[in-house]
Amino acid sequence: MSARVFIFGAGYSAQAFAREITGEAEFVGGTTRSAKNAAILAGKGIDPFVYTGEALGNGILEALHTTTHLLVSIAPDENGDPVLTGLRAAGAGAMPALEWVGYLSTVGVYGDHGGAWVDEESECRPTSRRSRWRLDAEKAWMAFSREAGIPVAILRLSGIYGPGRNAFVNLAAGTARRIVKPGQVFNRIHVADIAGAMRHLMQAPAGGVYNVTDDEPAPPQDVVAYAARLMGVEPPPEIAFEDADMSPMARSFYAECKRASNRKLKESGYRLRYPDFRKALEAMWEADAWKGESAANML
């Protein structure tokens, strides 16, 4: 693959993608919000660029001029997607070599469906501001795709976990909780499958919307209990949702319940490495890979 990849927002998931294409892409650049974190990216083989969401600087514009594959992993706000705004301001000739765009979104755009299954054709009725902004950004990128004639893949991610971010870490830190809300389920996705799905869609190259999620929507308390079993420790006691002390953001996640289908992604030819949380937790525990990196190095 003779690709030159540029990543806006080279955080946890995007770094996994960069590792996935190591040795395949001839260039991988990525942004971080501070010069302090630039050294961390450089140590991971990602050419670092500082970007705070304002206008695109000359260094970034120079890199974009030869970029063939673009990954956007930056959250939008009330003003829209800052990357798309910056590209439009830079003009139509800013990315003459561009062949594909990947945009990381969330299954949160579906809103609440009362536990029913949703797929890429289901109605989106987001309830939170951040999910409404995500949906608006998706629409803007799809409009860009039509205008530029370039495939844009929208990856709607479910709850992200992997090394350094999982129930084992929370149990070890004493922060794990088993909050029970009857009927509540969530989908999840291991970060390795996010990276694998991105690589798969990039190589196609594929456009359109894809749910990037596991096979098994499950109650959150079950995940904690299974991790505790593997660790050989007692799980924390169950707490009724009504009695749980939670932040407004955490509580908002429980206000929505749906089962996200990954059928379209699998029919495109991608095979999940971790189709459910049990297989993923078992693999991480057996390989002693659950701790991951320190939080400071995950950006």
Image (cartoon, rainbow, N blue to C red):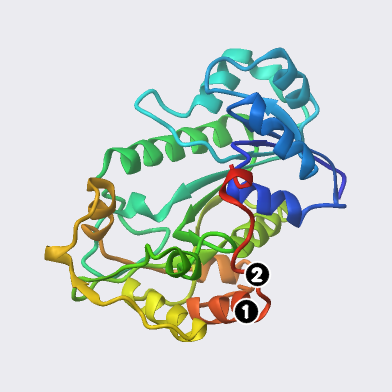
Nearer to me, 298 or 95: 298
Q: Is residue 183 visible?
A: yes
Q: Amino acid at mark 2?
A: Ala
* Residue located 42% across and 58% down the image: 120
Above/below status of 265 relative to 274: above
- Residue 14 coordinates in the image, percent (x, y): 63, 47
**Dot 2 alpha-carbon crowd within 10 angstroms: few under 14, some 14 to 19, many 20 or more:** some
Which secondary structure lies at badge 1? helix
Q: Is residue 29 visible?
A: no
Residue 77, by quadrant, is top left
Above/below status of 253 relative to 214: above
Whichever of labels 2 and 1 marks the residue nearer the N terminus, that label is 1
Nearer to me, 45 or 168: 168
- Residue 171 coordinates in the image, percent (x, y): 43, 70
Q: How many marks?
A: 2
Q: Is residue 218 toward the left or the right of residue 25 in the image?
A: left
Above/below status of 112 relative to 87: below
Which secondary structure lies at badge 2? loop
Residue 44, by quadrant, is top right
Q: Give residue 283's mark.
A: 1
Q: Is residue 63 toward the left or the right of residue 145 in the image?
A: right
* Residue located 55% across and 35% down the image: 146
Q: Dot 2 corresponds to which residue?
A: 289
Please state, as top left, top right, bottom left or bottom right, where the C terminus lies in the image: top right
* Residue located 24% across and 49% down the image: 247
Above/below status of 94 relative to 204: above
Asked if the residue under mark 1 is in contact with the one under mark 2, i.e. CB atoms within 8 Å, the reply is: yes
